[in-house]
Amino acid sequence: MPDSQSAKTVTVIGGGIAGIAAACALAGSGYRVHLLERRPYLGGRASSYEHPGTGEVIDNCQHVLIGRCTSLIDLYRRVGALDSIRWYDRFTFLTPGSSEHAGPPSIIQPGALPAPFHSTLAFLRAPAFSLRDKLAIARGLSSFLTGLPPDTAENFAHWLRRHGQTQRAIDRFWKPVLVSALNEDLDRISVHYAAKVFRESFLLSPESGRMGIPAIPLSELYGKAAGYLRERGSHVSLRTSAESLAPAEKGWVTCASGQSIASDAVVLALSFEAVAALLPALPQNPASEVLAASLAQFEHSPITGIHLWFDREVTRLDHAVLLDTTIQWMFNKSRLQPSHRRSEGSYLELVVSASRSLVPMQRQPIVDLALAELAQFFPAVASATLLKAAVVKEVRATYSVRPELDQLRPSAASPWPNVFLAGDWTATGWPATMEGAARSGYLAASAVTEALGAPQSFLAPELPPSGLMRLFPSQP
């Protein structure tokens, strides 16, 4: 670890989760870090802001994590944000006409049986699935007990057909879970990463699959990292864009918003398209040409968040999976976040992942569609007054986790000495998630320490399997 008199300096470009993780890991180990972020807040795509049309502070999209996200949880613990996460092990699947008031919902939660059977009894009682559906789901999940299939050209829609899944099992289990987790359609998803989602959410252990939801706005959550960095003598520059990066006698000089920042190493914690845009301003070499060609093959997938404010309470559920409709998840922000709790009224956020069909639509038709579908689950919506609404389309929400994409994902090493890459799109072993971003930051920070002569590892230990899953091979 560098001592206080001769601490090495590192510039981290990008204040999303990857950049925050890299910066906090290095600052916590004695490096002097300068974190640059072009927005006026930290968090990147996981952020919140005051919506101009409503005057309300909203998250750009609902972000959740699971217990298996050990590096993200470690980051929250490091910056003092872990107590801002609310944890759930109970999931409510609703079909039209079912709610807490009408018809039995399907409740999936751990029971007394050991992993991987801890949710079996709940599945057997779930009315959303027929016995044939349940047998197909059990058969499909059992394929992942002994490990993850390789990342081949096969997509998950084809895998489901090949493994004899019923249409209702696909529509009510495989699709809602996977599209929400990976933000992509089934015919564009790698079988390897689809298997990873289900193995770790439903099989590994009850703790692995529990869901964490931030109880404070996202920018407030990730803003805690700024205090952590400053307390350790590092700097955070918001509204600061990096225009170029040039090698110096010792290290690199970053030109950002009119200032020149010299450092021993640089971490590019940017989206894949932002790295591609910066490449022309960096020294060219054969490896940079390979990187440029790889980045050109990445694609985006959109998410749409629909925010609705009603004059009364329309549901007492904190969250629910909504089946057989365009809207996929309901998050009751009036119950999830204290800042949104009021004596009357309620605020819901609806999420549509892989929302390509909504991207060309105007705001009002989307709101009308959401209200009509929401009333199928919560009858109180029909008699409630909608006070205001907002539609947020994140067209570049995530990269598309297509089959064989791992062949293109680069490691933390870059084509230039002492410059490192971070971002959920890099080779983390995880798909496009907050955990993938946190891991990439920690991997980049480890690469920095090795290059600067004091190797350290920052990845948090993996969550161990429980029950009978201890008998099966562990997965990286």
Image (cartoon, helix red, strand yellow):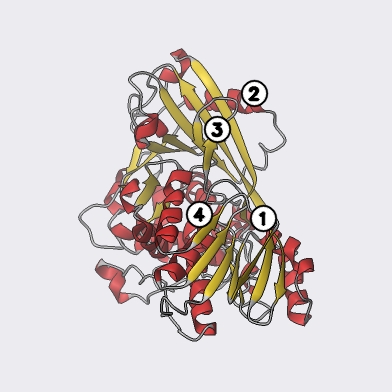
SS at mark 1 in the image: loop
Q: Which residue is mark 2?
A: 364
| Above/below status of 52 relative to 268 | above
Quarter of the image that includes the C terminus: bottom left
Q: Which residue is mark 1?
A: 241
Q: Is residue 297 at all visible to an observer of this figure?
A: no
Q: Nearer the viewer, mark 4 or mark 2?
A: 2
N-term mark: 4 or 3: 4
Give the Cα distance between marks 4 and 3: 31 Å
Q: Which mark is residue 165?
A: 4
The residue depicted at 50 percent of the width and 17 percent of the height is 387
Q: Nearer the viewer, mark 4 or mark 3?
A: 3
Between residues 15 and 275, which one lies in front from this camera angle? 15
Q: Nearer the viewer, mark 3 or mark 1?
A: 1
Give the Cα distance between marks 3 and 1: 30 Å
SS at mark 2 in the image: helix
Disc 3 crowd rating (10 Å Cα; few below 14, some 14-19, many 20+) is: many
Give the Cα distance between marks 1 and 2: 35 Å
Disc 2 crowd rating (10 Å Cα; few below 14, some 14-19, many 20+) is: few
Q: Position of residue 243 (x, y in %)?
A: 72, 60
Q: Which residue is mark 3?
A: 306
SS at mark 3 in the image: strand
Between residues 253 and 361, which one lies in front from this camera angle? 253
